[in-house]
Image (cartoon, rainbow, N blue to C red):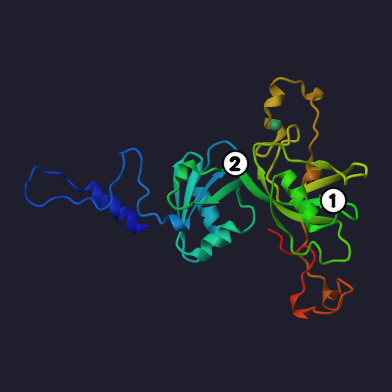
Amino acid sequence: MDQINNLVNAINNISLEDDDEGGLEIISDLQTENEQSLDGFNAKLCVVARFLSEGQVDFPAMQQTMAALWKPGRGVYIKDLEPNLFLFQFFHEVDVKRVIEGCSWSFNRRALIMRRLQEGENPRSVDLNTMDLWVQVYDLKIGFMTEKIITEVGNSIGKFVASCPSNFTGVWREYFRIRVTIDVNKPLKKRMKIKKAADDWYWISFKYENVPLFCFIYGVLGHFEKFCSRLFDTREADIVKPYGPWMRAPLKKQVKPIGEKWLRNSLVIAGRNPESHSYHGEGSSN
Ligand SMILES: [Zn+2]
């Protein structure tokens, strides 16, 4: 980022004089003195982010942590735009993609909500109120286990993004995995009623993978119930907690099963490439 510093220094050193000779061509004009310019940034390789929880962020420590987590091959420059709004300038598409498509990132247990900056977009007005999570869908009955139905389920949790490639490869699954964009200001959905035309309603339930901390009173992301505003108007003993840790999907053990090489996960043999095994649970965001 020497380039930007040099540019800022060069402009700071300019003095305007009353002289008819020559002229001053401003190559890159800074805005007001208070508002630092974002000139020199390459919007195509920028990510804007904020942390989910309120409160001060230790900026130097955060920079170290995120850089160490991401290990961007071409480096990253991090700028604090506002107390909880950051601009991450990367220098290669590979690094941006790895971060954007990677897992849920966090610092000091505070989840990072991030968006890729679109060209011409003001980083300060990027919508940072949603995040993508992997959701496990439990208790779907036979006859409901279709791509179309789990897509609809995703769209009632939030906005369906993707279905795990291994959802329909096994003979039987305990749950289906879907990637869903959720509104971080709304309570997490814990279960949902479902039925087909003439049938009866039944419940399916959800677990969230790598979910940031959330309130067991309101189900909203970003704070523990210990810090819930509800505590200020209700006696603790009277507070109902409809949400709980059971909504967190247990962390998968990433141990490769030894027998996998010889086990078939379907009865269908034709067209199967033995090199392209997809293990149960692969495609995880983690
Ligand atoms: Zn709360």
> Which numbered circle lies on residue 129?
2
Q: In the image as oriented, which residue stretches furthest toward the front?
A: 197
Residue 70 visible in rendering: yes
State yes or no: discs 2 and 1 in contact (Cβ < 8 Å): no
Q: Give whichever of 156, 284 is nearer the camera.
A: 156
Circle 2: residue type? Asn
Q: Establish if 216 lies above or below 104.
A: above
Percent x, y for residue 17?
11, 43
Can you name the residue that lies furthest to the left here?
20
What residue is shown at x 82% (from left), y 70% (from top)? 257
Q: Is residue 262 above or below residue 158?
A: below
Callout 1 amino acid: Tyr
Q: Residue 15's image quarter?
A: top left
Question: How many other residues sit within 10 Å of disc 1, few (<14), some (14-19) or many (≥20)?
Answer: some
Pick whichever, 17 or 5, lies toward us.
Answer: 17
Residue at (56% x, 49% y) in the render: 114
What x and y, as percent, mark residue 182? Answer: 67, 44
Task: Please state, as top left, top right, bottom left or bottom right, where the N terminus lies in the image.
Answer: bottom left
User: Which residue has dot 1 on it?
Assistant: 138
In-front residue for pair 76/64: 76
What mark, if any, has residue 48 been given in the picture? Answer: none
Dot 2: what SS?
loop
Q: Secondary structure at mark 1?
A: strand
In the picture provided, is 193 more to the left or to the right than 231? right
2 or 1: tag closer to the N-terminus = 2
Q: Specify whether 123 is left or right of 222.
A: left
